[in-house]
Image (tube, rainbow, N blue to C red):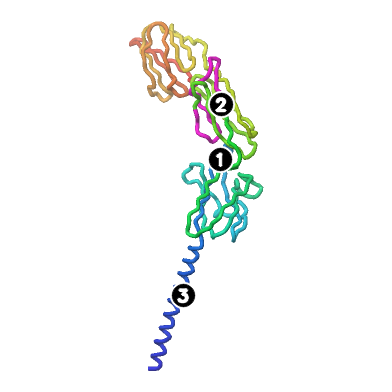
Amino acid sequence: MKTVFQIKYLSDTKTLGLIICVILILSFKNNSAQNTSNVIFNFDVSYFPFFNPEEDTIYLSADFPENNWPVPGSSEVFMLTDPDEDRIYSLSLELEIGDYSYGYWYNSGWDCSDLDYIIRFFSVSEINQTIELNDEPMSYMCYYLINFHVHSDDGPIENAAVDFEQFETKYTDNNGEVTYQISYAYECNVEYAISANGYYPVSGNFETSFCDYDIFEYLSMVRTSVINIPNSEISYELIKGNLYVNSDKNYIFKIYNVIGNLVYQSEAKTGSNTFNINHLNSGCYIFELTNGTQRITEKFILH
């Protein structure tokens, strides 16, 4: 009986010890979770034309208790991401109560660009909280305006497409103007391209220098000389998205793209005809004139 009692006693002791260990482990995990708050770092690079999401990366560095000012790029734990591609990069970390200083870096290493030239500060004063930090590069500096003025010999060009670095394409108003609002952390070279139906496109670049810019561009009208179609009494001319056709007879007028799809149809009367083809994209086309007994085709390029 003594032996049986000892075995039972040992068994109960082991069980009790196992229970105590489980309680201690759970208590440790609960205490660890309760000693932190979730901090979300959001960094908006919408106004930075030089930032290329396909090539560049943003890292966070700070005076973390266990990793004081980690080198940017040394760990993907501190890399911000932009899964929804809205140019707002985010990172979520669990941090203990305390005061913190932090900054954002552009690509890897201390030699890379500090996007702010400033160190920011925040505090975690309570546990089990969510703290969201919404930051922009160089929050203390002003944004700058880039004003594009697009004209031709005839005056302002409306609906000219302006492509400026990583920004969304914008179109000029009836004054031939469009404005971008941007900021730059340092002087850099930025590029742009301007196109309009009926005009030759232009492109250019300039160096930013912390001030507003006015860019003036004059587009040359696409104008061909009068072209006579061989073996006919028909001539045509392209001017600013319009096709002018002088015809000797009445014809059915059609335009096809290079793969043979019909993209425009009308009637050509005897004499002068004007066909507005501004809706067609730039490219190579073929127009056809038919009247039942005669078929005339001509290739032309729309700029």
Span highlighted in magenta in the image: 148-170
Q: Residue at x 43, y 18 (%)?
A: 277
Q: Residue at x 57, y 20 (%)?
A: 218
Quadrant of res 77: bottom right
Q: Residue at x 56, y 46 (%)?
A: 57
User: Which residue type does callout 3 highlight?
Assistant: Cys
Mark 1 surroundings: few (<14), some (14-19) or many (≥20) residues within 10 A: few
Of pointers 3 and 2, the one earlier in the residue sequence: 3
Res 242 visible: yes
Of pointers 1 and 2, the one earlier in the residue sequence: 1
**Residue furthest out toward the left:** 292
Q: Nearer the viewer, residue 43 or 134?
A: 134
Judged from the image, the secondary structure of the residue bearing numbered disc 3 is helix
Q: Nearer the viewer, residue 111 or 133?
A: 133
In this picture, residue 57 sits left or right of residue 268 = right
Q: Which residue is mark 2?
A: 148
**How far apart are labels 3 and 1 at the CA level?**
52 Å
| Residue 21 - label | 3
In this picture, residue 173 sits left or right of residue 271 = right
User: Which residue type does callout 1 highlight?
Assistant: Asn
Q: Does the segment drawn in magenta span residue 95?
A: no
Q: Does the segment drawn in magenta span residue 155?
A: yes
Residue 92 position within the rendered picture, expressed as x and y whole percent measured from the top left: 51, 53
| Residue 52 - label | 1
Residue 127 position within the rendered picture, expressed as x and y whole percent measured from the top left: 50, 60
Up-down: is 164 above or below 229? below
**How far apart are labels 3 and 2 at the CA level?**
71 Å
